[in-house]
Every structure is written in structure tokens, then in C-alpha cells.
Image (cartoon, rainbow, N blue to C red):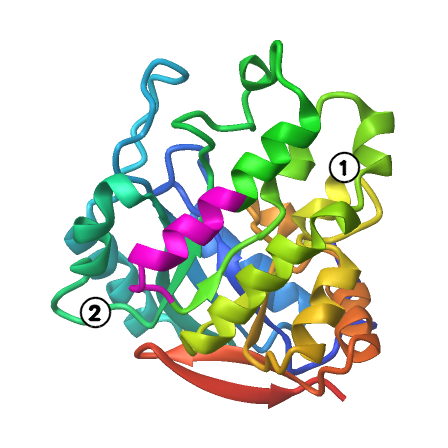
Amino acid sequence: MANVSTIHPNLFDCHVHTHFSTDSDADVKEICTAAESLGLRGLIFTDHNDFDWPFEESSDEYQLPLETYENTLSSIVKSYNGPLDIRIGVEQGLQRSCCDRINSYDSKNRLDFIIGSSHLVEGKDPYYPSFWEGKDVTKSINLYLDTILDNLDCCHNFDVYGHIDYITRYIPDSETRAKTNLKDCQDVIDAILKKIITLGKGIELNTAGFKSGDEPNPRRWILSRYRELGGEIITLGSDAHTPDRIGDHFELARQILIDCGFKNITVFKKRKPEFISIL
């Protein structure tokens, strides 16, 4: 976790999970305490919602009880007297098979922010070791990126696309993972970034990639390429599932963004972007 004495005072953690996510037991108030201790300006809770989850891989269910979730977090936010600016969002798993449900999600406009993420390749999550059995790494990455392009054609109810190279976190062989820089996929990545920009959406710098290597998700060259293509909307998120991961590597991430040509990070309120200086 970042040291409070070194973190920039304008940083928001815009990708945070709590016990409302099936893969987290984190307490909301403990998350807030951790964010306060770092000196973060604010955070956005973004628990998982994934329709059509592949139960053959996991007995977990990733469908969020939206009304209960929003009511509970809103109550906590209203009673909170600390220094944080706290907002409420969702990480929505994107898939063509459920694009109608995705595009009509949160019809009452309760949320501040929606991350759209690709977690599945042909209905399977590369997080699980079984995904990689008998798989060619290059072909799997290409399929994953094609899935993102397909999702962008039909799923539009989101604000930023999460961890664009998510699949690379879980390549089982560490040497192969370290050598995978995705440069061979630049054409399709360019197409993804251009489509995101055309839709008026953004991307995130997700620091969870640092747990398995020296690159965030997406990699630095992809962040730089997004900026070169005219991308401006970019959020910063730890993808924390436990309080100790809040704000992880945020000062390094801020410097990476500056090196890539960004002067601001983006946060969302009622689905509207706000730009905050990181200089």
C-alpha cells in the first residue's frame, strides 16, 4: 500500500470491490479507513456484475443485487463524516449474449460510474488455470482482444473500459507472461482504442497488474498510444478486493500517466466525467 507521505492529494481510487462482490469479503468501512490513511481524495466502489457467468468453472454468482447494493452504500456514504469523496459504481462484465440487459442496466440512474470489462473468452475466464489447459497463448490473447471489439459493437452502457489486457495477468508461465508485450497485436489494439474514443468513453489504468509483473493494465505503451490517438478520459483504479490493496502503486501510476502525456485523471459523478489535475 502506498505511503501517505508520498501520494498526490488529488488521486481517486475508481476501482474498488467489497463484500458485495462474490470474490471479496472486504468491509466497506475498512476500505474507507484504508483510503483515508493514504490521503486519497476519494474512491468509487465498483462491485462486480456479470450476467451469464460460466458456472461450470465456478459456483460463484457475480450478479449484483443492485437496489440493495446502492441503498446500503448510499446509507454509509450519508453517515460518513470523513475526508473522502465517496461515490458508487459497478464493474459490469460485457458480453454480446447479454447486451440488452447491460444496456438497460441501472434504468433508475442511481450510479455514478460504470466500468465495462471483458472477463471471458468464449465463455471462460482466464483467471482460472483450467482455461489455459491445451491453449495457445497467442491465439487466446487474439480471441480476447476480438471479444473486446465485439463487445464495443453492442454494449454501450459504460463509462470506461477496464483493464484492457486483463488476460495477460493470468498467463500461467511467468517467463511467457513477462515476454508478452502485445506489440504484435497493435492493429487490433488501435482499433479498440479508436472505437472507445469514438464512443466518447475512456479507459482505466489498473494497478493490479503490478501484482504479477512490472506493468499496469493496460501496459504503458497502450496508455501512451491511447493518448496519441486523442484519448483523454482515464481513471485510476487499484482493483482492490481487500483494504490493504487500496491505492496500490498509485504514485507510480501517476508518474506513468504523466510520462504518457496525461495532465489529469478522470472521475465520474452521475455518469458525467470530471477532470482532476495530477501535476
| Residue 153 appears left or right of 36 | left
The residue at the point 50 percent across, 75 percent down is 197
Residue most extreme to the top: 134
Residue 77 picture location, percent across and down:
33, 69
Disc 1 on helix, strand or loop? loop
The residue at the point 29 percent across, 44 percent down is 96
Residue 110's tag is: 2
Give the CA distance from mark 2 to mark 1: 35 Å
Residue 42's tag is: none
Q: Is residue 150 magenta?
A: yes
Residue located beneath label 1 in the image: 212
Q: Is residue 136 above or below residue 96?
A: above
Q: 10 Å neighbourhood of mark 1: few (<14), some, or many (≥20)? A: some
- Mark 1 is on which residue type? Ser
The reply to whether the C-beta atoms of the residues labelled 2 and 1 are less than 8 Å apart is: no
Residue 99 picture location, percent across and down:
24, 50
Q: Main secondary structure of the magenta part?
A: helix
Residue 233 picture location, percent across and down:
54, 78
| Residue 30 appears left or right of 269 | right
The residue at the point 68 percent across, 54 percent down is 207
**Depth check, front residue: 94 or 38:** 94
Q: What quarter of the picture does the C terminus occupy?
A: bottom right
Residue 12 picture location, percent across and down:
57, 72
For the record, the magenta segment spans 146-158
